[in-house]
Image (cartoon, rainbow, N blue to C red):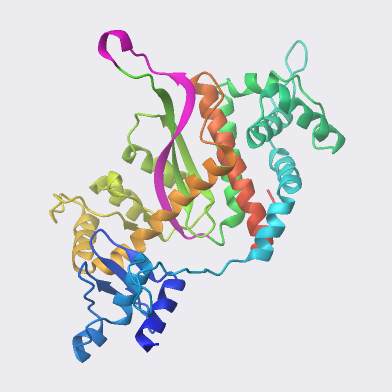
Amino acid sequence: MDFRKQKAIQLVKEKAVKPLDEGWAVHSQTSKRYYYVDENYKCDCPDCRLNGTQVCKHAYAVKYFLGIEKADGSTEKVRLTYPQAWSAYNAAQQAEITMFDELLKDLVTDIPEPAYVFGRPTLSNKDTAFCAVQKVYSQLSSRRAKSLFNKAIDAKQLTHSPYFNVVSAFLNKDSTTPLLQELLLKTAAPLKAVETKFAIDSSGFRTTRYTEYCKEKHGTPRENKWLKAHICTGVKTNVIAGAVITDGNAGDSPQLAALIEQTKQNFNAEEYSADKAYSSRKSLELINAQGAAPFIPFRIDATSRAGGSAIWHKTFYYFKLRQEEFMAHYHKRSNVETTFSMIKAKLGDGLKSKNFTAQKNELLCKLIAHNIIVLIQEIHELDITVNF
């Protein structure tokens, strides 16, 4: 086999091929730089420029990546295998349910309790928060989740098994939202030594409520209402470092400041990547003010005009003149899509609650549950110690 084709297969197996808006970036095997391969499979590497090679290993790698060609010249898609810490993954999956409840118990231990004033004592915030997150993680109804609460009593994870409707009442309180926000940040904190690069985006979660429609008169279809989760996620472990929940019509860019503010409470971010929805001078200024590098591609009509923003001018020319390097950083943004995929695959993309406050709190419980699942994986893979 031609040595270039051998090297190309190795490049694809190492995930060295990165799609760009136009063409592909292929990581060098001998340095930290990337080479650019265009739509005609022409590469700017020294092998092509100096030796006149028609198809270099980087161009072959792109063809194998796309499944256009195999090393023997046929067009069957190349089957690739990627390294995976299967022993750690298998151990984490088998221990997840048991460890989830134990970590959740530790997480809620320090929740403050309101001072008793008068009347019948209420269930503690600690126990109610435990039950709320456990119910959302299980994806059971409130009535069916009652059996989980009873088991938690036997395991000494709860002091009292509440009436099934208590969890719904807890999620319907506005005061629950800041409490859950704090729990979310606490679940991310154990990974502060691991994560330095973050990706930002939003995704919708469907509710059981519907928009108003007038099908008879206008033929407007019946549609679900949606909530939007805006998150900042670490690109190595997919832990959520910050989150803002809004209605489905809220814009993405206005949430950036809150996401960065939450992330910096636990992490020293070196870079943030986000899509063009966040492309503005204000966004770049917010990220730069935290000492981090912004990797947000520019819209097609953007110009280098600074408008009082030096970082806009600097980043614009970095984007234009060193696009391969820029896009290699930007494509870490795909990890936020992975995070949403993980949440929806394991915890569902729907919300059972009926009103906005309860839906928002239920979605926060999903994000907390996701972070605990991530911690369980990293306990087995990175051998970290989790102390809330």
Residue 214 visible somewhere in the drawing: no
Classify residue 321 by image quadrant: bottom left
> x, y (%) of residue 138?
67, 35
Residue 263 visible somewhere in the drawing: yes
Q: Which residue extends farthest top?
A: 217
Q: Residue at x 19, y 88 (%)?
A: 52
Classify residue 16 by image quadrant: bottom left
- Where does the N terminus fall, quadrant-wise? bottom left
> x, y (%) of residue 191?
58, 56
Check if residue 208 falls in the magenta segment.
yes
Query: Please, is residue 5 above or below residue 197 in the view?
Result: below
Q: How many marks?
A: 0
Q: Residue at x 70, y 28 (%)?
A: 128
Between residue 291 and residue 338, name the one nearer to us. 338
Between residue 290 and residue 38, name the one nearer to us. 38
Q: Residue at x 29, y 50 (%)?
A: 285
Q: Residue at x 63, y 21 (%)?
A: 168
User: In this rendering, would 318 be left or right of 31?
Assistant: left
Query: Please, is residue 114 above or below residue 261 in the view?
Result: above
Q: Which residue extends farthest right?
A: 154
> x, y (%) of residue 379?
68, 58
Q: Which residues are magenta?
A: 195-219
> x, y (%) of residue 24?
29, 67
Query: Please, is residue 11 above or below residue 239 in the view?
Result: below
Check if residue 180 falls in the magenta segment.
no
User: In this rendering, would 82 be left or right of 166?
Assistant: left
Between residue 83 and residue 190, name the one nearer to us. 83
